[in-house]
Image: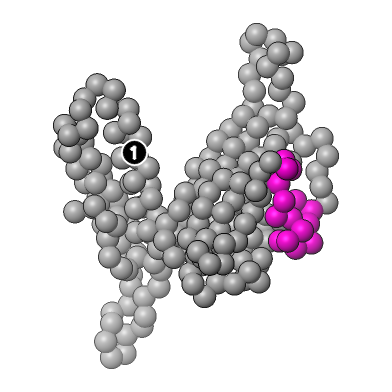
Amino acid sequence: MPRYNAPFEIHVHGQVPLRTDIRFEQLQDVLKPLWKYAGARSLADGAGSSYSDEPGIKFDAQEHLLQMCWTVAGDHDFRQALDEMCMNLNDVAVAGAAIEVTFYDADFDEEEQDVDAESRDDFLMLFVGPNPAAIMQVQRDLLVQDVVSLMERHFDGAELGGVVAEVDKLFTQRFDALVNSLAIGKPPSGPGGGHGGGHGGGRKPRHLH
């Protein structure tokens, strides 16, 4: 049911590229944590945002793309719905994607609050993808954008190749550590051997040399 007098207005924003075989019915199950939290009975019922000027949750079947610009009233327990949604999206995403989630303090009024009062606004950056390499690729790209944007205030972009290379090195180390951790205890392959689980296999993210 809708949450009245909720302490936060929560905005979810992002685009997730989906596998070509994903249909609306499957996406409805994937996003059930969101529309159910909003008190809706289906994705179609819950796709609308609290604000009419926001597009809400949209499924572009032609581009195989999930688009979210959606606000709902809620509390900190919405984080559980986000965790479930991300786990579901990992199973249907074809590439890595970032999802921004902002918690706006619904009771905070900058003009009426005391000078020392602070809002309870909060911000999360979530990442989804078909495997760790795809997720790390998005994390890497965003970090490079942030670092380059910051340093271009002082240096020419052409001078920052070494900085980008160091960022790549860090993510390569993280990826290798993840693959090695997943390989520990993995049954031997070949006759009589089992099949290893997890998403550790596959190629490394782009740019991570």
- Is 43 above or below relative to 101? below
Q: In the image, is residue 115 above or below residue 83?
A: above
With 209 as the anchor, is 106 left or right in this view? Answer: right
Residue 110 seen in the current view: yes
Residue 76 makes an appearance in the image:
no
User: Relative to residue 8, is residue 62 drawn left or right?
Assistant: left
Give the residue displayed 60% in from the left and 61% down from the top: 59
Q: State the image coordinates of residue 40 (x, y, percent, origin top left).
A: 78, 57
Q: What amino acid does circle 1 point to?
A: Gln
- Please report the bounds of the magenta region as a residue range: 36-52
Predominant secondary structure in magenta? loop
How far from the left and from the top, in percent, is residue 197? Answer: 40, 73
Residue pointed to by mark 1: 145
Q: Is residue 38 left or right of residue 103?
A: right
- Work out which residue is located at the far top of the displayed protein and give it: 115
Q: In percent of the image, x 68 and y 16: which residue is there?
A: 110
**Viewer-proximal residue, 107 or 180?**
107
